[in-house]
Amino acid sequence: MSVSSSTPISSPCDLTQGGRTLRRSLRCHGIGLHSGQATNVQLHPLSPGQGRLLQRRDLPGSAPLTLSPEVVQPSPLCTQLAQGEVSAQTVEHLLAALAARGISDVLIDLDGPEVPILDGSARDWIEAIDAVGVTPCYCREAVPTPLPEPIWIQDGEAFVAALPAPQLRLSYGIDFAAAAIGQQWHTWTPVREDFAQEIAPARTFGLAHEVESLRSRGLIRGGCLDNALVCDGDHWLNPPLRFANEPVRHKILDLVGDLSLLGPIPVAHILAYKASHRLHVRLAQCLRSRGYA
């Protein structure tokens, strides 16, 4: 990854607020996890109220896409956005980093179909954003509307829910037959624990026995041991892990990115078990339909 940067500036923020943009533009370059294509990304500041836009520089004349749950298109193993001619996949790690720094007005400028996977986490995105800095909050701090009743989205034994709570909290559970992963649960409370330290470094992961099948379907063409953890039964092919429960922390990272399509994330206890990008987005769509956006 290459990034234009200056002295790092710390810019922690509440995921439920937003109201910031970048101080300066930044650039990065990397390989798409699924497409295998090299892509250049530029992030540019926007004025208050312009929102979060995504444009494809390689599609001249196309209108920018406005980020929202409604522009998500079905895609295995990642979140893909599409509106008119413009589409982009694997946006979730970048979106999580933007949300964690409260950036609600930004132009994401790509010259290809997929956001680079970088090291498989959001750590490089957070470091790049902190390097250029973010503006102070330019809108009056709002009092988040409390969630009046639980919302559940279920598919078999997998589910994601938003439960009334006094502050934002995200809890996730996973259960894999592979012994190296097994059953894992993790809870992250943003106001108490730093995203950059606790969630952003967690990398995407996969199972060794699925690699060839996924590649035969045109997926993970850019995947390698430098940008994904690979589990082979009772061991990892590329240790060490950054956390003992790195896989479930990565699922929280994905959840933050997907829910950030709403803008600021509603104050609730978000609870997920064996969920997927599809279920995450269905919850975001349900919350938006009830006025939480």
Image (cartoon, rainbow, N blue to C red):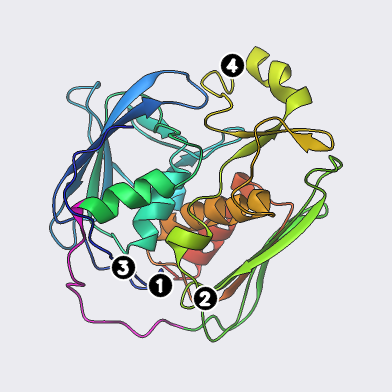
Pointer 3 or 2: first along the chain: 3
Question: Looking at the image, is 86 positioned above or below residue 160?
Answer: above
Q: Nearer the viewer, residue 18 or 284?
A: 18
Marks 4 and 1, how far apart at CA? 36 Å
Q: Nearer the viewer, residue 242 or 291?
A: 242
> Helix or strand or loop: what does disc 4 sit on?
loop
Q: Counting other residues with Cα less than 10 Å from the Cα at mark 3, is it few (<14), some (14-19), or many (20 or more)?
A: many
Pointer 4 or 2: first along the chain: 2
Which residue appears at 82% of the width and 49% of the height? 182
Marks 1 and 3, how far apart at CA? 7 Å
Q: Are marks 3 and 4 in contact (CB under 8 Å)?
A: no
Looking at numbered disc 3 in the image, what kind of residue is underneath it? Answer: Gly
**Which residues are drawn in magenta?**
132-145
Magenta residue check for 189: no
Q: Nearer the viewer, residue 66 or 168?
A: 168
Which residue appears at 27% of the width and 82% of the height? 141
Report the residue marked by disc 4. 218
> Helix or strand or loop: what does disc 2 sit on?
loop
Report the residue marked by disc 2. 168
Marks 2 and 1, how far apart at CA? 8 Å
Which residue appears at 60% of the width and 81% of the height? 164
Res 16 label:
1
Judged left or right of residue 45, residue 119 is: right
Report the residue marked by disc 3. 18
